[in-house]
């Protein structure tokens, strides 16, 4: 099912949670709403589910306005951040709940309910825990019960609020992969909210980056990562070096030397140059002077555990972070205190905020 | 204050049985000793002494006194009315707690404070006030009379008094549970297609139930033994509206110590058994609800 | 957020009609059972005018009942306060065998009928009680005298302070006290400087409830007092005597004093809750 969101606004008292948001969700895609807390992403999710009402604007499912459809009539599967499992019901009864509360005429026979719940529990790999209570499960297991429960009503849309937020790192990664496979099998239009850029980039078909109640950028993970719309997106999508420079006559300069940048340069004036650590190119320092178009820096600290080495450099008084492979590091034979040349493979420049 | 405890506290922690877990805090000996002595003096010895006096009476006489029709009927009235009142309170107390926790309306804080009135108002004052209202010439009693029935001086009057006395128990035990309910759980039920009523009966009520049972048990226990607020409104007609505590007082006034002791002991025994039963019910509902 | 958790959740509230109906039902119920009795007390007390009301209060027997009630509370409340603090210190700050049994025994007076609370002392110290003859020979009277009234009151108000303090002190744990001891404070200093400031509101709360019950107790006191006018009659007992003599105005006049006491208690309780709102919220967490 496709979802169209048009100019949705929502305020809580003086706080603007959503300031006129429009978005098209394609049928069958897995979409991530990514943003810091307070960016309005959860509010948008709750409005789609009918758990909150928009002050203005409309949300339609396959072209039908949802304004007058209560949450319970929307056939939306919602997975809550803290799972919201019914504590007094077994895993089985939790999953069966949505089927058992259907109107008599629509309610499947108890035998069909059993079969359907068993199927779902098999799918989420929890058949052996059907008679347990939620309190007896681990966080990851609870999460999967919540998912099975939401899927039981055969929703046309699946909404997940910070689905991995309450889990520890290892479980989180496993569950992420598993959810991706599940989505590939079922192709339910799915939207999940997250503040973790890694999660959004790894899992989603498309990522919607939000900030201050606005949508900043929509695109595939590669698009938003490689071509961030603005400095906020650049910043938010992972580690970044921010170097104060200037724009002079359409050229970005750092310490007087020109920096090759992707995209528009902007008007003259003070500017911030954005470089991701893995786009910092290091070289062996020559015996004398600095090569043309490069900078010189000193290694101030070095972390070389795992396949990737992280270096902190001192570039004329600025801290600069660089990432390179262990092999490259041993080729360069860098140590704390040694000098090297610095260049940037890809950089972006945005005007400095006044 | 510290002498007794420091000896216990500084001993190396033994494996196996130890009365007091290791601690560096002082004062346990004094505090515990005083507590136990005071408890024994004020509560345990007097109550135990009563049980001994009841045992002195002898088995046959014990049952003869307890099973006399007038006594049996008083038991029936006391326990029946207390149960009825507790159940009425279960419904209305839940409504009051719900309204106080969930809704904001003018006067809410005043009502919240007033709920404790039965705790604070002396029972004899409550008794004469309720009688004044529900007697046939009282404000509500007159309405009932016009409708053709009597409230005061019948078991119905006893129930009214016990509803008054027990109400805060229910409200105050249910309130914190209602406050702690996770709103997400209700939203989950709604998003799964449950109606408001289904959400209440299938999701909320089972969560509230253990607290509700506790409240009912407290109100019931209080109601069974209640004296002051009941005797004025009950009319105390033997075999109709006579409660057990009144029977005990009556025996005492006739210097029938044995009779009073036996009835009192029997009443405590029955209360104890019922509370035990409620405790089991409680455990059962809680076990189905394993946090 | 916890202040109004449901106002922002439009999907799960009741409709406005249902809301109104429930609020109406609650108010109606409370009006019939709480407000009406209170109104009745004062309106009956003033039914024959202010003069009759004051005459009922100025009666020497009524004044002596007021005096006795105050005396009894002045003895029973401090006793149970000391007990409550000692019991909660032992129970909340230490782990020992049989703790839950001790807790249950402290609660026992709550589940004993007030009448039985009086009876147990009559059986011990009454004329036909186990120690009755010995006491009579030594010229000591407990039952049908002030000591009996005090004992019965202590019994029924026994758990109040302990009941408020124990959960509060358990909630607060022992870390603060342990820190104080490690820093070199004595036991008494630890209690006075660390524990007491944290339990102040619970203490006041418990004393308030204990006092209300001590002044208002009827059943237990009625059994042991002997209803001797001007001597062993407390205010609640005096209300009963006047009522049974059909002296309604005087009965309700004395009752109105007790009702006033109840209202003051409730107001003080509300004020305490307002004053210590942050501590109460912290303790609930």
Image (tube, coloured by chain):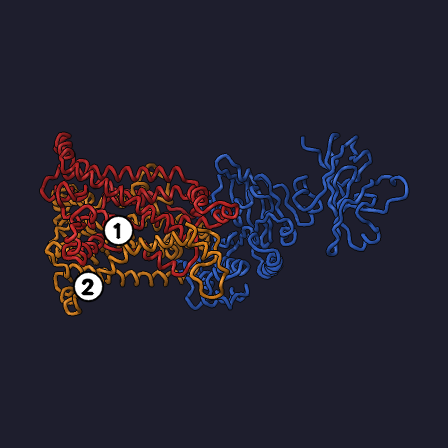
User: Chain C colour?
Assistant: red
* In front of the other: C202 or A194: C202
* In front of the other: C246 or A20: C246
Left or right of residue A4, residue C234 in this image: left
Residue A34 lies, in percent from the top left, at: 60, 46
Identify the disc placed on residue B54: 2
Identify the disc placed on residue B93: none
Left or right of residue A350, residue B109 in this image: left
- Mark 1 lies on residue: C155
Label 2 secondary element: helix
Q: Chain of mark 2?
A: B
Residue B216 lies, in percent from the top left, at: 29, 55
Which chain is the one coloured blue?
A
Residue C79 lies, in percent from the top left, at: 30, 46
Residue visible at 48% across and 53% down?
B24
Q: Chain of mark 1?
A: C
Q: Residues within 10 Å of mark 1 (few under 14, many from 20)?
A: many
Label 1 secondary element: helix
Residue C112 figure quarter = bottom left
Residue visible at 84% across and 47% down?
A283
Which chain is the one coloured orange?
B
CB contact under 8 Å: marks 2 and 1: no
């Amino acid at each position: 099912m496709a979802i169209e969101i048009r100019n949705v606004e929502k305020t809580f008292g003086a706080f603007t949670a959503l300031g006129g948001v429009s978005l098209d969700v394609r049928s069958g895609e897995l979409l991530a709403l990514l943003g810091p807390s307070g960016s309005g992403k959860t509010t948008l999710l709750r409005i789609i589910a009918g758990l909150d009402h928009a002050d203005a604007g409309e949300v339609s499912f396959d072209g039908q306005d949802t304004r007058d459809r209560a949450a319970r009539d929307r056939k939306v599967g919602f997975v809550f951040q803290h799972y919201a499992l019914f504590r007094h019901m077994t895993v089985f009864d939790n999953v069966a709940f949505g089927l058992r509360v259907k109107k008599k005429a629509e309610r499947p026979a108890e035998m069909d309910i059993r079969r359907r719940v068993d199927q779902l529990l098999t799918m989420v790999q929890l058949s052996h825990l059907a008679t347990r209570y939620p309190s007896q499960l681990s966080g990851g297991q609870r999460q999967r019960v919540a998912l099975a429960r939401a899927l039981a009503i055969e929703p046309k849309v699946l909404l997940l609020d910070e689905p991995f937020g309450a889990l520890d790192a290892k479980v989180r990664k496993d569950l992420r992969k598993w959810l991706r496979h599940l989505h590939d099998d079922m192709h339910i239009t799915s939207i999940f909210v997250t503040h973790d850029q890694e999660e959004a980039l790894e899992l989603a078909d498309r990522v919607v980056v939000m900030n201050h109640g606005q949508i900043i950028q929509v695109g595939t993970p590669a698009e938003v990562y490689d071509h961030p719309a603005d400095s906020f997106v650049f910043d938010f999508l992972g580690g970044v070096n921010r170097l104060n420079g200037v724009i002079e006559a359409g050229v970005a300069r750092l310490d007087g030397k020109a920096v090759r940048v992707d995209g528009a340069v902007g008007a003259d004036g003070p500017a911030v140059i954005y470089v991701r650590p893995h786009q910092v190119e290091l070289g062996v320092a020559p015996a004398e002077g600095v090569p043309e178009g490069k900078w010189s820096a000193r290694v101030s600290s070095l972390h070389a555990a795992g396949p990737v080495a992280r270096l902190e450099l001192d570039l004329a008084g600025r801290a600069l972070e660089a990432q390179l492979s262990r092999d490259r590091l041993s080729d360069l034979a860098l140590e704390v205190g040694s000098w090297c040349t610095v260049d940037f493979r890809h950089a972006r420049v945005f005007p400095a905020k006044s | 204050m510290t002498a007794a405890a420091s000896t216990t506290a500084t001993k190396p922690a033994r494996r196996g049985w130890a009365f007091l877990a290791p601690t560096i805090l002082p004062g346990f000996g004094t505090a515990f000793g005083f507590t136990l002595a005071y408890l024994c003096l004020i509560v345990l010895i007097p109550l135990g002494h009563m049980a001994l006096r009841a045992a002195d009476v002898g088995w046959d006489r014990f049952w003869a006194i307890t099973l006399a029709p007038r006594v049996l009927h008083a038991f029936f009235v006391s326990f029946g009315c207390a149960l009825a009142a507790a159940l009425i309170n279960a419904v209305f107390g839940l409504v009051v707690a719900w309204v106080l926790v969930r809704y904001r309306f003018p006067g809410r804080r005043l009502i919240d404070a007033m709920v404790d009135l039965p705790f604070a108002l002396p029972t004899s004052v409550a008794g004469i006030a309720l009688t004044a209202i529900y007697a046939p010439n009282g404000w509500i009693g007159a309405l009932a009379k016009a409708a053709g029935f009597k409230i005061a001086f019948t078991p119905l009057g006893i129930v009214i008094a016990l509803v008054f006395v027990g109400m805060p128990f229910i409200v105050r035990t249910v309130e914190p549970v209602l406050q702690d309910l996770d709103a997400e759980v209700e939203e989950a039920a709604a998003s799964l297609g449950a109606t408001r009523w289904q959400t209440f009966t299938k999701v909320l009520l089972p969560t509230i139930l253990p607290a509700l049972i506790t409240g009912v048990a407290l109100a019931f226990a209080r109601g069974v033994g209640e004296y002051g607020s009941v005797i004025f409104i009950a009319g105390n007609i033997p075999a109709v509206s006579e409660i057990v505590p009144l029977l005990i007082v009556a025996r005492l006034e006739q210097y029938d110590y044995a009779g009073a002791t036996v009835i009192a002991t029997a009443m405590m025994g029955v209360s104890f058994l019922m509370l035990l039963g409620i405790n089991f019910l409680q455990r059962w509902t809680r076990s189905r609800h394993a946090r | 957020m916890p202040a109004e958790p449901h106002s922002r959740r439009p999907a799960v509230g009741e409709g406005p009609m249902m809301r109104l109906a429930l609020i109406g039902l609650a108010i109606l119920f409370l009006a019939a059972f709480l407000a009406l009795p209170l109104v009745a007390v004062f309106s009956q007390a003033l039914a024959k005018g202010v003069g009759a009301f004051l005459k009922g209060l100025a009666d020497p027997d009524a004044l002596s009942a007021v005096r006795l009630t105050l005396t009894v509370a002045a003895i029973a409340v401090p006793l149970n306060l000391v007990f409550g603090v000692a019991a909660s210190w032992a129970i909340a700050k230490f782990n020992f065998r049989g703790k839950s049994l001790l807790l249950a025994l402290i609660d026992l007076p709550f589940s004993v009928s007030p009448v039985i609370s009086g009876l147990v002392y009559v059986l011990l110290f009454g004329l036909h009680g186990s120690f009755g003859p010995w006491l009579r020979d030594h010229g000591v009277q407990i039952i049908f005298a002030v000591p009996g009234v005090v004992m019965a009151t202590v019994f029924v108000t026994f758990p109040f302070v302990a009941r408020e303090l124990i959960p509060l002190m358990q909630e607060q744990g022992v870390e603060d006290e342990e820190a104080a001891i490690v820093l070199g404070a004595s036991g008494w200093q630890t209690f006075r400087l660390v524990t007491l400031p944290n339990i102040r509101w619970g203490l006041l709360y418990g004393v308030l409830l204990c006092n209300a019950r001590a002044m208002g107790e009827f059943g237990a006191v009625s059994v042991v007092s002997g209803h001797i006018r001007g001597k062993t009659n407390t205010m609640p007992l005096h209300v009963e005597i006047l009522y049974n003599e059909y002296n309604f105005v005087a009965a309700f006049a004395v009752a109105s004093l007790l009702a006033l006491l109840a209202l003051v208690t409730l107001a003080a309780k509300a004020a305490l809750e307002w004053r210590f709102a942050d501590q109460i919220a912290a303790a609930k967490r």
